[in-house]
Image (spheres, rainbow, N blue to C red):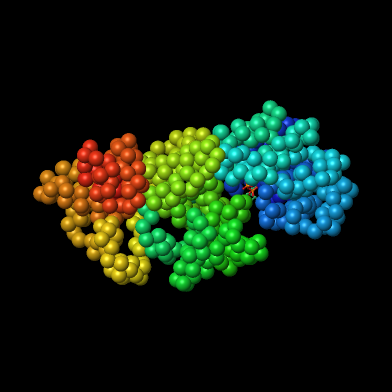
Amino acid sequence: MKNILKKYFGYEEFRPLQQEIIERVLAGKDCLVLMPTGGGKSLCFQLPALMLEGIVIVISPLISLMKDQVDALNKKGISAELINSTLSQVEIINVMKKVQLGEVKILYIAPERLPVPNFENFLRTLKISLIAIDEAHCISEWGHDFRPDYRNLKFLRNKFPGVPIIALTATATSKVSEDIVKQLNLTEPQIFISSFNRPNLSYEILPKKDSLGLILALLKNYKDKSVIIYCFSRNDTEDLVRQLNYHGYKSAPYHAGLNNETRKDNQDKFIKNEIQIIVATIAFGMGIDKPDVRLVIHHSLPKSIEGYYQETGRAGRDGLPSRCILFFSYADKFKQDYFIKGIQNEAEQENAQENLNQVIKYGNLYTCRRKFLLRYFNEDYTKFNCGNCDKCVKQAPIEIPTMSAISKISALKKTKSPNPYKANVIEKIFSGSTYDETAKLLQQKLSVNEIAKMRKFSPKTIVDHIEKIAEINKAIDLTYLKPTSERFEKIIEAFKKSGGLLLAPVRTILGEEYSYDEIRFARIFLNH
Ligand code: ADP
Ligand code: ZN
């Protein structure tokens, strides 16, 4: 086995679990492989293809990547072909002939091919050594990327008895992996789970304020480095691309609204480093194999932790340090709540809400973000400090470029908004030393009353300070001041109902039981 690994793939050693998985496959048994992106899943079916008699059928939803994979295999001297909608009828027939002559070791097909009349009959004429189902989470409606075409795979187990099935995915919670096993009807499957920890990725959250300014500030440190920015909507991606290009960056959008050609062109240019930044909706990145993405920014909240993990997983596949930054805002949560309310199916709606709740929880953590992510995938991370997230290591504050700050000020002056929250943005730029003094005491984790006493101000003034400090210094840790979660949730609920960030309407909703100071405090944490 090692000889083949070396001869065809050029590797000296197996990565964790690869050998065990391959042995299971060679024994003709079913298995489910949960391995993070870049973990080396493909080898688990590609290597057995060379050892087993017959052909391996690989089912993958990633039509755009199939060709690359097939080309890469052929280059290694492994005979591989693909059948999907990008091929003409004549080309498909030619591939089928070649397959029937036994000249092909690995055949990639798209899931929608299975119900095509006669295709199943064609498959039955072959000696299939293994069926590999890539991105297997797509079969589960509980996952973040359900694909109706994957329903076609439910019958494989019965239609091809005796052919082992290997299902592979980079993201599956225990609920989803149980569902995969059930839907695929796997026989006594062994489930292989390799660690989902990506030690070279740092996980950070920044409050979403002046997001363009923040992005420009971050990009300063990523000259000529590849960056992916995920946005909520197609419009958001287009807007951001315009802004970035205006500021001299080479960026391009990637979303389902673009025609295939443009999308592929943008993706290719990104892979070839002709474009530095891809601004995408979640459609981007499934399976994209660019090793040197150094920064992944989530411009708005992801819909689920699974999605977030997979999207951030595009960073640093070469193992070098890379950053994953999420811009957090409750406004984005409310936006998503609104969409979730529109989901007709009750179970689906509940699932979407729970997924979002987990994302909010991630954003509000007091403790290590990595630990939370790994826990989400049922992995225990036992280290006390991961040394590579914003909860374990203090991050250097980000200086927003003055150009953006200046344009922000003039924009605000023009609007003459009475909203005190907007006024704070101006304060932030002209911060005075009186705040610094309070900030020092906050760093010592003193209570509002203690600080008020020491500084000889009223507690109300100190709350004023805190509100401004939170604006100025995003890195300061104020979590110890946070209201208890039950009351906090109530206040958030009220902000949501009020449709804005003003205190008075929220107080009216909540009643006497909540003080203005408490509501103001909660408002700080909406964005901090
Ligand atoms: P996944 O499908 O799990 O995201 P891939 O199968 O694409 O990951 O593999 C990720 C990278 O790791 C590829 O560049 C692959 O060539 C490499 N790789 C896989 N197995 C090994 C190994 N045993 N030793 C070294 N590199 C490997
Ligand atoms: Zn950590």
In the rendered image, residue 175, in percent from the top left (x then y), is placed at 56, 33
In percent of the image, x 61 and y 54: which residue is there?
288
In the rendered image, residue 459, in percent from the top left (x then y), is placed at 15, 46
Residue 430 seen:
yes
Where 401 falls versus 64 (above or below)? below
- Residue at the far right: name it: 101
Quadrant assignment for the N terminus: top right
In percent of the image, x 25 and y 55: which residue is there?
468
Residue nearest the observer in this picture, 50 or 337: 337
In the rendered image, residue 501, in percent from the top left (x then y), is placed at 31, 52
Residue 496 located left or right of residue 321: left
- Residue at the far top: name it: 188
In percent of the image, x 65 and y 61: which residue is there?
260
In the rendered image, residue 174, in percent from the top left (x then y), is placed at 56, 33
Residue nearest the observer in this picture, 150 or 216: 150
Residue 198 seen:
no
Where 223 falls versus 181 (above or below)? below
Q: How many numbered marks does the figure carry? A: 0
Q: Quarter-wise, where is residue 363 in the image?
A: top left
Residue nearest the observer in this picture, 64 or 45: 64
Where 381 falls versus 310 (above or below)? above
Residue 206 located left or right of residue 282: left
Residue 116 located left or right of residue 246: right
Where 510 falls versus 275 (above or below)? above
In percent of the image, x 38 and y 55: which residue is there?
208
